[in-house]
Image (cartoon, rainbow, N blue to C red):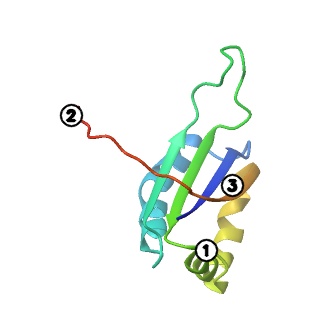
Amino acid sequence: MIRLTVLYNLQPYVDEVEFLEWRLTDHQVENMAVQGVLCSDFSRITEGWPVDLKPPYQFMTTADWPNMESYRNDFYDEDYQAKLRENIKMLKDPIFLVSEILIHETKEANQ
């Protein structure tokens, strides 16, 4: 499985409340509508470690694809890249990381 992780802050002129309203609704729907995407998570970064570390990023988005071919077909699609270039204008200091998940485990919530 391939995971795209995006770490970022907001540009100073971006209203955080409006950004969150868009990110948690319309943009999440767009992310999940990408054909190969298996899941997409959005997080606010609240703490760092060690305890006194101030995290350098405010938000994190992840999206998973079944394989590298699917990721590359979707992510580098011309229409997707056009939307990305527009959306990225709201972000400050974004870092895009692509990783290959070598192991993935989950626990039952009621354990």
Give the secondary structure at mark 1. helix
- Residue pictured at 60% horizontal, 83% vertical: 73
Give the secondary structure at mark 2. loop
Looking at the image, residue 92 lies above or below residue 46: below
Residue type at tag 3: Met
Residue type at tag 2: Asn
Q: What is the number of the mark on residue 90?
A: 3
Residue placed under numbered mark 2 in the picture? 110
**Residue located farthest toward the top when viewing the structure as drawn:** 52
User: Which badge, 2 or 1, is on the more N-terminal residue?
Assistant: 1
Q: Quadrant of residue 50?
A: top right
Image marks 2 and 1: residues in contact by CB distance under 8 Å = no
Q: Nearer the viewer, residue 81 or 103?
A: 103
Is 16 positioned to the left or the right of 107 in the image?
Answer: right
Q: Give the position of the C terminus as an image quadrant.
A: top left
Image marks 2 and 3: residues in contact by CB distance under 8 Å = no
Q: What is the number of the mark on residue 68?
A: 1
User: Which badge, 3 or 1, is on the more N-terminal residue?
Assistant: 1
Q: Position of residue 106 (x, y in %)?
A: 37, 45
Q: Nearer the viewer, residue 104 or 47?
A: 104
User: Which badge, 2 or 3, is on the more N-terminal residue?
Assistant: 3
> Total number of numbered labels?
3
Which mark is in front, 2 or 3? 2
**Residue located farthest toward the left when viewing the structure as drawn:** 110
Residue type at tag 1: Met
Q: Position of residue 14 (x, y in %)?
A: 66, 47
Query: Dot 2, crowdedness within 10 Å: few (<14), some or many (≥20)?
Result: few
